[in-house]
Image (tube, rainbow, N blue to C red):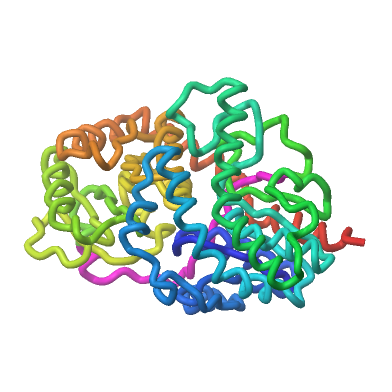
Amino acid sequence: MITILCSGSRGDFQPYIALALELKKLGKDVRITGIRSFESFIRSYGIDFYPIQADFESLNVDKAMLKQAQGADNPLKMLLAFNKMKKYGIYMAQEFYSACEGSECIVYHPGVTMGYFAAEKLGIPAVLASPFPMHKTGEQTSVVMYGRMKSNRIINAFSYSMLQGMLWLASKDAVKGFWKEQFGAIPHQFGCPFERHTDRRHPAVISCSNFVFPRPSDWNSHIHQSGYWFVEEPTDYQPSEALTRFLQAGEKPVYIGFGSVFDMDEKDTMSTLVIEALAKSGRRGILCGMGELPHLPDHIFAVDSIPHSWLFEQVSAVCHHGGAGTTAAGFRAGAPSIIVPFANDQFAWAHRAHDLGVGAKPIPVKKLTADNLAEAIRFVHNDHVIASAKALATHMGTENGARDCAKVIVDCLERKA
């Protein structure tokens, strides 16, 4: 059994679902471990699930603190947010360790470093599986600073130390506390494990396209990046009759949705702003995840949750918060991007889309207005941006990151002796 340890929101789990499905195709038993609220979602793909019973609700996590974490729009705020969140990991440590027992290999999200130390204790391979490039390199800036500071070797090195340090901060106290209680001492060679993935028994796999961020030449050969890990959604999705009529009634609309970071308390303000921007740009729109929106004009349609792999093929551009998974889905569909980053690595994806010529300049949510959103919508509908977006999608179509990285994991099992 290969056990994959995950953390984060629904969108954070999707790449790991893709990886698990590819491992199953290679004949491996696999399960995903995460908080219990994701169980039905994971099992809907035919993947076994080990639920962590402790979650934000059962731990009475301060909702204001969660909101602050989701709105951490600079590295200092990110660091403070990770520091506040770390105490809750202690309550999950026992369950994450128990999930590792009986496994032949542990694949872990960088926010769950318990995976590395549990694997070492159990004498089995550990695979670091990251949803973004995170290993030190002098060639590019990390996702916590990309677009914020000019790239040079000193800045780049510092930015990766900061990224790794924040991720380690989020889980190290949980590992340390559990280990002392369970085994009477801290783990052997206790410390940030990310740069220890330097051999076939400890490889690292990255979900990212080499056409978005090229694999750095100064990474060691056991860090593998060969494309995004895309979930192959069920092909039997059927849109409602109302949505079908809307799509057929005119030119392709603009998708606008801000995922799990969207605060429903801001629904009225945000929907009014978006409706005004669409009117000023002269475009039709599909608004996603903003709840009930009565009295919408005929050129705007509201939806709740629809597979991005289907919907993004139906639109002329995608406007979103810049989550890594949503950004990748937009790139894959060949749709120009308008990214309104709220926090964390979303700023990096926003800047990267613009740098690649497939998106508008980033519009931080705190600076979002109807006028600048309308301007961005007009910008991404020019021929050059449209052609660049389609070219990127074509290049990405030559990659299969989930399949290739699953093969790396199976290879590390075959060589574990």
Residue 366 to residue 250: above or below: above
Magenta stretch, overall SS: loop
Q: Dividing the image into 4 quarters, which one contains the N terminus? A: bottom right
Q: Nearer the viewer, residue 79 or 311?
A: 79
Look at the image and give the residue range highlighted in magenta.
223-245
* Residue 157, visible in the rendered structure: yes
Residue 315 image point, x, y percent? 31, 50
The residue under the point 23% across, 56% down is 287
> Is 246 left, or right, of 169 in this rendering?
left
> Is 130 left, or right, of 240 in this rendering?
right
Q: Nearer the viewer, residue 328 or 380?
A: 328
The residue under the point 80% across, 61% down is 120
Q: Dividing the image into 4 quarters, which one contains the C terminus? A: bottom right
Residue 148 to residue 12: above or below: above
* Residue 232, visible in the rendered structure: no
Q: Nearer the viewer, residue 179 or 216?
A: 179
Residue 373 image point, x, y percent? 22, 38
Q: Is residue 231 magenta?
A: yes
